[in-house]
Image: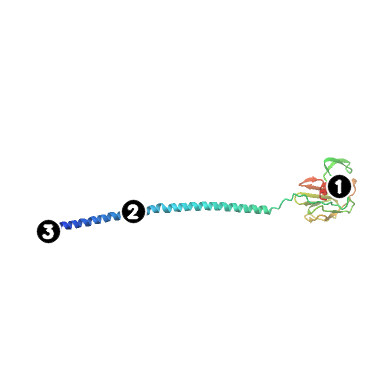
Amino acid sequence: MNQKERRAARGLQIVAVCCCFCLLAVGAGVTYRAMDREKAGGGETLQKEQPVTAVQSKTIEIAQAEQQGEAEKTKEIKEIKEAKETKAQPARKNEQPVFAAPLEGETKVVLAYSTDHAIYDPTLEQYRTNASVSLSAKKGTEVKAAADGVVKEVKKDAQAGNLVRIAHGEDWLTTYGQLADAVAVKEGESVKQGQRIGTVAAPTKYGVALGEHLIFAMEQNGEPQNPMEKMKTAE
């Protein structure tokens, strides 16, 4: 091979080597861009989908839990409040008190209790209904409370003279009339069964035909009751 041919062969080799380097460079560039695009695309996908989905799900669960917790807390507070209010209110006493006679010993009824039909009143000389009983008793005889209670009223009445009203719980009320001026109790005072509340006085002109006596009345929730029957149940 002459010198000219050797030069031509060397030139071809140089060209071939350069082409190889170029191809390698182009391939490397394409590969790098592809990897970079894939990396960038994957990061964007993770950033858009995974974090947002997780946060939203967690937020919804927390909100639901908070709402449920607030509802349960409100219900609990309401139940406690209702329990306190119920406890604060005193129980209504519907049981009948055990009534004792306001006078000691046997007593005679000089004007009976009668609300369903009229009976004769010798003082007024006419027939009328009567929501109390008049019990014969000498002037100065002690009058006692028929049951434990609180004095609700002490006043002077034209027909019944001096009278005392005693409340027994929320439902029951007893009234004692034709008392002497020296009443032994005052309004608002608590009294015990058998405690002296006064003495029998001379009758007013509206009961003079009955002689000396005590007017004794009883009510339940504002409705008149027969004292003789209620005292019998206490025996």
Q: Which residue is mark 3?
A: 6
- Please state if 108 lies on the left or on the right of 80 as rendered: right
Q: Colour scheme of this structure image?
A: rainbow
Structural crowding at the residue carrying mark 2, measured as other residues with C-alpha within 10 Å and reported as few (<14), some (14–19) or many (≥20): few
Disc 2: which residue: 38
Q: Nearer the viewer, residue 175 or 233?
A: 233
Q: Earlier in the sequence, mark 3 or mark 1?
A: 3
Instruction: Give coordinates of residue 206: x percent, y percent.
Output: 87, 46
Q: Nearer the viewer, residue 214 or 26?
A: 26
Count the marks: 3
If the image is split into quadrants, where does the N terminus sit?
Answer: bottom left
Q: Secondary structure at mark 1?
A: strand
Residue at the image point whose x is 32% and y is 55% from the top: 35
Q: Mark 3 is on which residue type? A: Arg
Q: Residues within 10 Å of mark 1 (few under 14, many from 20)?
A: many
Residue 74 appears in the figure: yes
Tell me whether circle 1 and circle 2 mark residues in contact (CB < 8 Å): no
Between the C-alphas of marks 3 and 1, the distance is 161 Å
Q: Nearer the viewer, mark 3 or mark 1?
A: 3
Q: Residue at x 58, y 52 (%)?
A: 74
**Percent coordinates x, y for residue 45 in the rendering:** 38, 52
Q: Nearer the viewer, residue 211 or 99?
A: 99
Residue at the spot 44% in from the left edge and 53% down from the top edge: 54
To which residue does mark 1 refer? 134
> Is 77 placed left or right of 5 in the picture?
right
Q: Secondary structure at mark 3?
A: helix
Mark drawn on residue 149 = none
Tell me the kind of residue under disc 1.
Ser
